[in-house]
C-alpha cells in the first residue's frame, strides 16, 4: 500500500515536471517583459509581431506544406511496402527489413549531410522539395515499421477468403487489408507528420535562403539571443501539434497510436 | 504457376517505389559520404578526387575522438537517467493504474513529445536562465545568494536530453510490463517470495526487452540531437555533431567532415547492435 502511494506521488510529480516548461512558455508568450514576467502585463503583442513577420509566416507555411506532403507520401509508400514485405520470402524480406532498420538507427545528421552532398553533386537546388525528399526518407521507414507490426497481428485467412471470392490483389488490399490496418495508418500519418514538423537537422542542411522551415528560423532567432517572440512562435507550433493529436484521437484510441 | 508470376509482379510493383526511394535517398547519400571521405580538400575548399586515408588519420586525432566520446558518454548518461526516472512511472502505470485510466495517463506522458521540440528546448533555456524561475525560487528560499550559472554546462545538456527522451523509455518499459503474466507474481508471492525478491526475480528479468528497446531509442535520439547541446550546453562542450557541422559550413573541409561522419555512423550502429545482442541474451520472454 505504501509502495503504491509513493509511486503514485512520484508519477504525479513526474507529470507535473513534464508540463512545467510548456506552461512557462505559454505564460511568457503573453507577457510584455521577458525578464520581469511576474510583474509585466498581459499582451498579445508577440503574436501580433509574429504574423507581421513575412519571413517567419512563410517558413511556417513551408513547414506545414512539407509535413503534410511527407506524411501522405510516406504512409502511401509505407503501406505498399509493408504489405509486400509480408508476402515475399525471407531471403528478400530480411535484407529489406535491415535497410529500413538502418534508416531508423543511422544518426540523422549523417543522412542529412549525405543528401545535401548528393543534391549538390547533381545540381538539384536545395529548398522545400529537397527537405520534403529528406523527410520522406525517414517517414517511409517509420511508416513501414508501424504498419508491419499491425499486419503481423492480422488473420491471413481474411485475405485468402477475399481472394477465393474473386477479389483481385488490388481489391483485397483496398477493401480488406486497408480497413483492418486503419489504426496503424492513422498512427503512421500522425507520427510522420510530427517528425517532419519538428525536424531541425534535415531542414538545416537541405534548406536555402527563403526556402526553409520554422524550426530552422527559430534556431537562428534563439542563437541571436533571447527574444520573447520565440515564446509566441513556440506556443503557436504547440497548438498546431496538439490540435492534430486530438483530431487523430477522435478517430483512434490512444493505445493504438503508440 | 501463372497465378504465382502475377503475384510476383504485383508485389514487386508495391515494393519498388519504397525500395527505390531508400536506395536513392539513403544508400547513395551514405555511399557518397564514404567516397568523399577519401577525397582531398583543395586550397579554396573545393573537392579533389583522390584516394587518401589522410582524412581518417586526422579524424582519429584526440581532439575529434574526444568529441565523439563526449557524445557517447552523454548519451550513456542519459540512458541511465531515463531508466532511473522512467522505470518507476512505467511500473506505476502498468501495475497500479486501473485499466480504464491507462490511456489518459499514457496521453499525458506522450503529449509533451508532440509539442514543438525546439520550443521545448527554448522553454528549458528560460527555466534555467540567470533570472529564470529556478534561480528565482532558490534565491527566495535563501538556498543560494547568487544566481547559479545553470546554463552552458554539461548538466544543462543532460537535463534537456533527459526531459526530451524520458517518454520513450517510459513507453518501452510500460509495453514490456503490460505483457507480464500477473499470475507469475502471485505464484512467487504464494511460494514465500518477498515483494522485493518477486520484483528482482520476475518483473525485472521479464522487462529486459522493454529496457533494451528504450535504451536503443534513447541512444539513437540522444547522439543525433543537435539543438539541445547547442542551446543549453553552449559551444565549450563540443559534441561530434557540432564538429561535423563546422567542417561543412565553417572550415569547408568536406572530406574531413565526411570521414568524421562515417566514423560516427559506424560507432552508433556498432553500439546499437551491441545493445541489441545484450538485450537478446538476457531476454527471457
Image: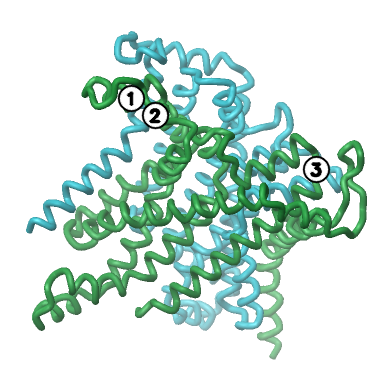
Q: Residue B257 appears at what percent x and percent y?
A: 75, 48
User: Mark 2 falls on what kind of element?
Assistant: helix
Chain depicted in cyan: A
* Badge 3 or badge 2: first in the primary sequence: 2
Q: Residues within 10 Å of mark 2 (few under 14, many from 20)?
A: many
Q: Which residue, given by chain and number where applicable, does mark 3 sit on? A: B253
Crowd rating for badge 3 (residues with CA inside 10 Å; few <14, some 14–19, many 20+): many
Q: Are marks 1 and 2 in contact (CB under 8 Å)?
A: yes
Secondary structure of the residue carrying tag 3 is loop
| Residue contact at pointers 3 and 1, CB within 8 angstroms | no
Nearest the eye: B18 or A23: A23
Q: Position of residue A17 (x, y in %)?
A: 29, 38
Considering only order in the chain, which callout, 2 or 1, is on the residue closer to the N terminus?
2
The residue that mark 1 highlights is B135
Q: Secondary structure at mark 1?
A: helix
Residue found at x 31% / y 61%: B174
Label 1, label 2: how many angstroms apart (C-alpha)? 7 Å
Q: Residues under labels 3 and 2: Cα distance?
A: 35 Å
Amino acid at each position: 500500500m505504501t509502495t503504491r502511494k509513493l509511486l503514485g506521488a512520484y508519477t504525479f510529480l513526474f507529470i507535473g515536471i513534464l508540463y512545467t516548461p510548456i506552461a512557462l512558455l505559454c505564460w511568457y508568450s503573453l507577457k510584455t517583459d521577458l525578464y520581469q514576467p511576474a510583474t509585466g502585463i498581459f499582451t498579445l503583442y508577440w503574436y501580433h509581431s509574429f504574423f507581421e513577420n513575412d519571413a517567419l509566416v512563410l517558413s511556417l507555411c513551408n513547414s506545414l506544406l512539407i509535413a503534410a506532403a511527407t506524411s501522405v507520401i510516406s504512409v502511401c509508400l509505407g503501406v505498399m511496402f509493408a504489405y509486400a514485405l509480408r508476402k515475399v520470402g525471407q531471403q528478400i524480406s530480411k535484407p529489406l527489413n535491415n535497410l529500413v532498420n538502418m534508416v531508423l538507427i543511422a544518426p540523422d545528421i549523417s543522412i542529412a549531410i549525405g543528401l545535401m552532398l548528393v543534391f549538390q553533386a547533381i545540381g538539384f537546388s536545395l529548398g522545400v522539395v529537397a527537405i520534403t525528399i529528406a523527410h520522406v526518407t525517414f517517414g517511409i521507414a517509420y511508416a513501414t515499421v508501424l504498419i508491419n507490426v499491425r499486419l503481423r497481428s492480422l488473420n491471413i485467412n481474411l485475405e485468402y477468403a477475399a481472394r477465393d471470392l474473386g477479389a483481385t490483389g488490388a481489391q483485397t488490399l483496398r477493401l480488406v487489408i486497408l480497413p483492418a490496418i486503419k489504426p496503424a495508418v492513422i498512427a503512421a500519418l500522425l507520427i510522420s507528420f510530427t517528425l517532419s514538423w519538428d525536424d531541425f537537422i534535415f531542414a538545416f542542411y537541405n534548406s536555402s535562403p527563403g526556402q526553409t522551415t520554422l524550426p530552422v528560423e527559430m534556431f537562428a532567432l534563439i542563437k541571436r539571443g533571447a527574444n520573447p517572440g520565440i515564446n509566441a512562435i513556440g506556443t503557436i507550433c504547440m497548438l498546431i501539434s496538439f490540435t492534430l493529436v486530438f483530431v487523430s484521437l477522435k478517430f483512434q484510441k490512444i493505445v493504438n497510436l503508440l | 504457376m501463372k497465378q504465382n508470376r502475377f503475384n510476383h509482379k504485383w508485389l514487386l510493383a508495391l515494393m519498388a517505389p519504397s525500395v527505390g526511394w531508400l536506395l536513392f535517398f539513403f544508400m547513395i547519400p551514405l555511399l557518397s559520404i564514404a567516397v568523399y571521405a577519401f577525397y582531398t580538400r583543395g586550397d579554396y575548399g573545393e573537392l579533389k578526387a583522390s584516394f587518401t586515408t589522410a582524412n581518417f588519420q586526422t579524424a582519429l586525432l584526440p581532439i575529434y575522438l574526444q568529441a565523439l566520446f563526449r557524445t557517447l558518454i552523454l548519451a550513456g548518461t542519459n540512458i541511465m537517467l531515463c531508466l532511473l526516472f522512467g522505470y518507476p512511472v512505467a511500473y506505476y502505470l502498468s501495475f497500479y493504474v486501473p485499466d480504464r485510466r491507462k490511456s489518459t495517463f499514457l496521453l499525458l506522458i506522450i503529449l509533451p513529445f508532440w509539442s514543438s521540440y525546439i520550443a521545448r528546448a527554448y522553454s528549458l533555456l528560460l527555466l534555467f536562465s540567470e533570472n529564470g524561475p529556478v534561480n528565482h525560487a532558490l534565491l527566495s528560499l535563501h538556498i543560494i545568494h547568487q544566481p547559479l550559472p545553470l546554463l552552458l554546462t554539461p548538466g544543462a545538456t543532460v537535463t534537456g536530453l533527459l526531459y526530451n527522451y524520458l517518454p520513450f523509455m517510459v513507453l518501452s518499459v510500460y509495453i514490456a510490463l503490460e505483457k507480464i503474466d500477473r499470475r507469475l507474481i502471485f505464484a512467487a508471492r504464494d511460494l514465500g517470495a518477498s515483494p522485493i525478491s518477486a520484483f528482482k526475480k520476475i518483473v525485472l528479468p521479464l522487462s529486459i526487452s522493454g529496457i533494451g528497446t528504450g535504451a536503443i531509442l534513447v541512444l539513437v535520439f540522444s547522439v543525433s540531437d543537435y539543438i539541445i547541446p547547442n542551446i543549453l550546453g553552449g559551444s565549450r562542450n563540443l559534441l561530434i555533431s557540432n564538429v561535423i557541422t563546422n567542417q561543412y559550413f565553417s572550415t569547408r573541409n568536406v572530406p574531413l567532415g565526411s570521414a568524421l561522419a562515417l566514423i560516427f555512423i559506424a560507432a552508433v550502429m556498432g553500439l546499437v547492435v551491441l545493445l541489441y545482442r545484450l538485450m537478446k541474451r538476457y531476454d527471457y520472454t
